[in-house]
Image (cartoon, helix red, strand yellow):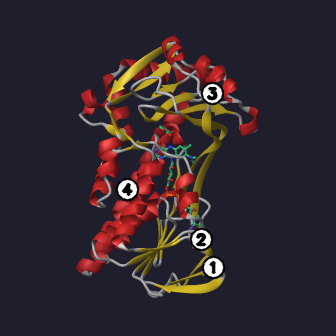
Amino acid sequence: MRTQVAIIGAGPAGLLLGQLLTRHGIDNVILELRSADYVLGRVRAGVVEKGTADMLDEAGVGARMHSEGLVHDGVELAFGGQRHRISFRDLIGKAVIVYGQTEITRDLMEGRAAAGATTVYEAEDVSLHDIESDRPKVRYRHKGVEQELDCDFIAGCDGYHGISRRSIPDAVLRTYERVYPFGWLGILVDRPPVSEELIYANHERGFALCSMRSPTRSRLYIQCSLEDRVEDWSDERFYEELKRRLDDEAARRLEPGQSFEKSIAPLRSFVAEPLRHGRLFLAGDAAHIVPPTGAKGLNLAASDVFYLWQALLDFYKRGSSQGIDAYSGRALARVWKAERFSWWMTSMLHRFPDSSGFDRKIQQAELDYLRSSQAAQISFAENYVGLPY
Ligand code: RFL
Ligand code: PHB
């Protein structure tokens, strides 16, 4: 088989890139390790930046997001027993859309099927070859048969555990990492959200987040220990703990229900550089991870795809390699700012097991500054809704 761009991974990064390329007449094939149902079963992000929403519109799959997604003009921060609202709309005239990654993935998969583009699900043992030449190849096994895909470029959109990043020689790749000493325990439950907007809570017992997927479905998180197992947390225990971390009004409004998804995610900051080696490009979680506190992971995957899509358009439509040469630098400049914001929000809102009295005082001062300074709130708002591309 031959294509112009071989895309590894059918997460949001791979599917969005595929859809944008297809709509501009650039042939592409996606190879995905898992089944479509498995990919759709993963519960992840919920907050969509304006730039990401624009990209989904550009890809022709934004309609359901606009009709079913919830436009949020601000967020609430809870600490010291009180809630403080930060209004993006008032501060910078912008908003975010709350719409689940699962739904985005479904919309992209349907768009791809309608466009007739090829996705190979359950592609096993994917390996990349000749990436330093201008005729790279991808080998894989499908239904027990060995296959080879010839292409011009490979887009490594296969997430943190994928093979693309590992195909770049050690001598070339630099990595930067911070692992946090806690995780997030999250549940999905069919109960109305506690509040109209997201509540991010800093409490001496640990961080908590009340998010949502719809007016009838809540997504709730609490900071937990890395030793905790999902089985340790009955719904009852989860709600009891969450209640203690919220202000009185939110705690009263919290309606316990039976969860239908419960999982623990570790928190990590990670960046691999450069994002290009020969004819291979990395995009999304394959290249970088942010802790979920800033709601940036999916949105960074979208901005990488924007730069990569533009670079490939430059190459195929204008015969220029400029975009390709600039891709890594352009994407990383935005990645590092989102890494900074996610690290900062994580540091400000969580309880660190080894924190000293000094560390906690600094954390309180940070929160108090944010509560009382419009300049600090504008900076928060501009980062949360997403820096420009
Ligand atoms: P994905 O979604 O991991 O997709 C990668 C795909 O590649 C496949 N794959 C392979 N395919 C072929 N061969 C191989 N060898 C392969 N190895 C892997 C995988 O099966 C998969 O289908 O990466 P992508 O596309 O870069 O997208 C990144 C986002 O999924 C991720 O950043 C976000 O979910 C992060 N995230 C959030 N991001 C936000 O922007 N806003 C949020 O509110 C937000 N909340 C979250 C989050 C992530 C969370 N978890 C569980 C990590 C909340 C949580 C709890
Ligand atoms: C979510 O709804 O899953 C969510 C929202 C905001 C975050 C992280 C996750 O910062």
Q: Quadrant of residue 206?
A: top right
The correct choice, above or below, for 383 with respect to 297 in the image is above
Amino acid type of the residue that numbered disc 3 sits on in the rendered structure? Arg
Q: Give the residue at mark 4.
A: 303
Earlier residue among tags 4 and 3: 4
Earlier residue among tags 2 and 3: 2
Amino acid type of the residue that numbered disc 2 sits on in the rendered structure? Glu
Residue pictured at 62% horizontal, 19% vertical: 204
Q: Closer to us: mark 4 or mark 3?
A: 4
Q: Nearer the viewer, residue 360 or 166?
A: 166
Earlier residue among tags 1 and 3: 1
Q: Give the residue at mark 2.
A: 122
Q: Give the residue at mark 1.
A: 143
Disc ID at residue 351 = 3
CB of mark 2 within 8 Å of CB of mark 3? no
Residue pictured at 58% horizontal, 23% vertical: 256
Mark 2, other Cα within 10 Å: few <14 / some 14–19 / many ≥20:
some
CB of mark 1 within 8 Å of CB of mark 2? yes
Question: On the picture, is 332 further left or further right than 222?
Answer: left
Which element is circle 1 on? loop
The Cα–Cα distance between marks 2 and 3, rounded to whole angstroms, is 40 Å
The Cα–Cα distance between marks 4 and 2, rounded to whole angstroms, is 27 Å
